[in-house]
Amino acid sequence: MTISSQGRKAGPFPGNGATTVFPFTFKVFDKTDLKVLRVDASGTSTTLTLDSDYSVTLNADQNGSPGGSITYPVIGSPLPSGYSLVGLGDLPYDQETDITNLGGFYPEVIEDMVDKSTIQIQQLAENVSRAIVFNEAESTSPVLPTALGRANTVLGFDSSGALELLPLPSSLGAGDLQMLVYAAGTDFTPGATTQIVLPRAPISRGNVWVYWDGTPQLDFTVSGNTLIFPTAIPTGISNVYVRLGTTLSVGAPAQQSVTDASVAPGSKLWNRVNGAIADVRDFGALGYPYDDSAAFLAAVATGRKVYVPSGVWQIKQTVTINNGHLFGDGQNSTVIRWIGTGVNDTIFKLGALSSISDVFISFANPDGSSIVTGNETTAQRIAIDVGAAMYPLQRGGCIRRVKIGECGTAIYNKAGSSPVQAVFSAEFADIECQNFSYAGFWFGSPVRTGNVYRNIYLNSAKWPQVQYAFYLGGQESEITVDQLNIESMTCVSPVTFSGCSGVSVGTIHFEEVILAVNSAGLISWDKSAGRIDVLTVYYCDIKTTDWSIVKFNSSSVAETGYDSLTANYLNIGVFHLVGLNQGLQGSPTGLTGLSGVYFIERPVTPGAMYCQIDNYTWSTFASDQAVYQAFPCDPQANISFIQTAAGPQNVGSSIPTSGFSAWWLRRHDGLMEEGGPFTVPANSTITVTFPNPYTNQALHIDVNAIDASTTANYSVRAIPVNNSTFQIVNASSNSISGRWHSIGK
């Protein structure tokens, strides 16, 4: 028969979720002469398997009625919408008919031979129809160089349209610039060699730089992949260095691919060209799971601002920054992991006018698990050391918007006798430190001045106990601490001020902090002087004895030359307690029945110590109001409590005292005073003298008392006498004790 159909392709047949039979109309000799492709919505084709994925039914007479039908699938759901099916002729390219000399044969044998040849030609034509070809009117040769000549190139065309191989440009993923070294005696013979064979053709002479032992050469030509000198390489030359290739894209970029915004001042391209920003990626940083230490060090060495973009970046060499700046895309976007294994490792050393901002720093294995063991001590696994660079952090140097995760100590300034290591006039702001095993902040150097600590959040619930949350030791003056939050940890000494003068604290907040050892305080105040505006303590459980909120630990006298009221002195503006020993949910235990619990304590006697409290408030969810009202404090009477305005330190014998001198609280507006404790025997009246007489008679006096026998709250009558005194009347048959507050003008 004749082959009337010129195509060897059926389809594409679009799927509709229902059709399963697809026709084809070209001749085949067997069902295996057909190939079936399934094409998904993205255009990706998959070759299907005969009798497994699909079946073929052939028409009985392939000469009279060529073709048949494809059934897909053999089992399963019909071809869905968005998919298509294509059938292609797949007759093998062979000829298996053998015609012998003088032998007999049928005309059908000859006809099948010719038909097969025609079908094979049609299959080739179908493939060629999808190929890139030169215009038939041109005589351009499509012959490519050898594999050696084609290596690391891309196919292009020269100015006449002829085929050309171009160096692989960086825009396609990598530049091909390389340094080649040819040694005398091995690669060339001095005094004789005039040609050197390169690993590939440079295409253009401009893509080759030649040096004889470091001396640049301009007199050479290039032919294919051969470098040709007009005279022999001189005697005495040890090496010929050849820089071959380019890191720049060849040709112009696509239209509108480079916009004004992409090259405007402030853009990444502008910053890189003009030297404002050193992006670690420009120095070879690849991100997780690679070690990018070399790239970080190279970027810092430029002296430019170092940019670390979003992603996870791993290093294991300490990065030291002096008078430099490193920043990322945010605490939750730019993650810098230390993957070194040394216990004494430090991630960053920051000095002089330097800064780190908007990054997350931690010690972690490549899989993200912690390297920290929980057994770290001083100066082990430090995230940021601010005193070990060429100069300490100073005069505007800062750490801002930084989160520090797994570490031994988050931010560290080593102890020592030399002021060279002392941080001064630096700022630490908007910092979150979590899961440190030894300390959050640990500053022990001497002669630190003018540092600011602002909005610091410290949380380390992971470890059984840590040593410090916030430690300022050594010697520091003119300190500003604004919003220090200590939460969710078991700690030996949560906050320590030691040798600190001129302390100004906005707020210190404790929540769910447990002291790990006996005879400790949430705040250790040692040889220091200053003010805490607001001190709040929420839901701190008590699991030790001799527990205190503020513990004065100085065992030495006030410093020589200081006024006694400015050395070893603490003023608390608002002292606010909530749910002590009740847990976050408010267990019924509270403070009732606990011994050795003191809100303010000084266990040692030498030296003067002064404390002033302006306002005391509390809330409790347990039946322990009496403990809060009694304000357990200083059982050794080692602290002198002073009032905020001039006047006597206590009211004298008219109010019996218990444990320590009567203390006074005065509101900042000068119109409200509080005092106590007092005791009034049954059926008795006492007279109380205001420490600061009002201009006129007190307008209102409230007395809160507790019945000594029933511990029930008890309201008693207060009678103003004049602007200096009032009386407390107890008409009950039981002794009462408590405190009072008054409002006057």
Image (tube, rainbow, N blue to C red):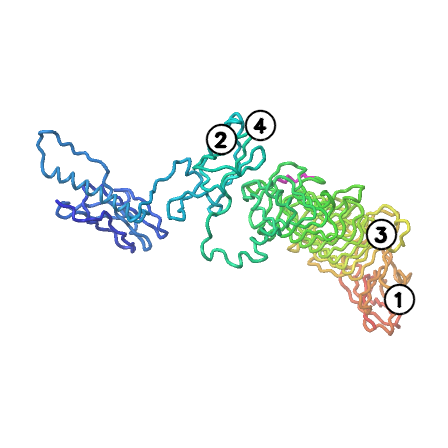
Helix, strand or loop at mark 4: loop
Which residue, given by chain and number where applicable, does mark 4 sit on? 236
Q: Relative to residue 210, is residue 74 drawn left or right?
A: left
Range of magenta residues? 371-376
Pointer 3 local density, CA inside 10 Å: few below 14, some 14–19, many at least 20: many
The quadrant in which residue 508 appears is bottom right
**Quarter of the image containing the N terminus?**
top left
**Quarter of the image containing the C terminus?**
bottom right
Q: Residue at x 58, y 35 (%)?
A: 215
Task: Give above or below for 673 relative to 631.
Answer: below
Which of marks 2 and 3 precedes in the sequence?
Answer: 2
- Residue at far front of view: 231
Cα separation between marks 3 and 4: 80 Å
Task: Give above or below for 4 relative to 212.
Answer: below
Helix, strand or loop at mark 2: loop
Residue 531 or residue 550, whichever sits in front: 531
> Do callouts 1 and 3 mark residues in contact (Cβ within 8 Å)?
no
Which residue, given by chain and number where applicable, does mark 2 sit on? 194
Cα separation between marks 2 and 1: 112 Å
Which residue, given by chain and number where applicable, does mark 1 sit on? 689
Which of marks 4 and 2 precedes in the sequence?
Answer: 2
Which of marks 1 and 4 precedes in the sequence?
Answer: 4
> Do callouts 4 and 1 mark residues in contact (Cβ within 8 Å)?
no
Do we see residue 61 in this rendering?
no
Q: Relative to residue 403, is residue 189 drawn left or right?
A: left
Look at the magenta stretch and give its main secondary structure.
Answer: loop
| Magenta-span inclusion, residue 374 | yes
Which residue, given by chain and number where applicable, does mark 3 sit on? 568
Which of marks 1 and 2 precedes in the sequence?
Answer: 2
Q: What residue type is disc 1 on?
A: Thr
Do we see residue 119 in this rendering?
yes
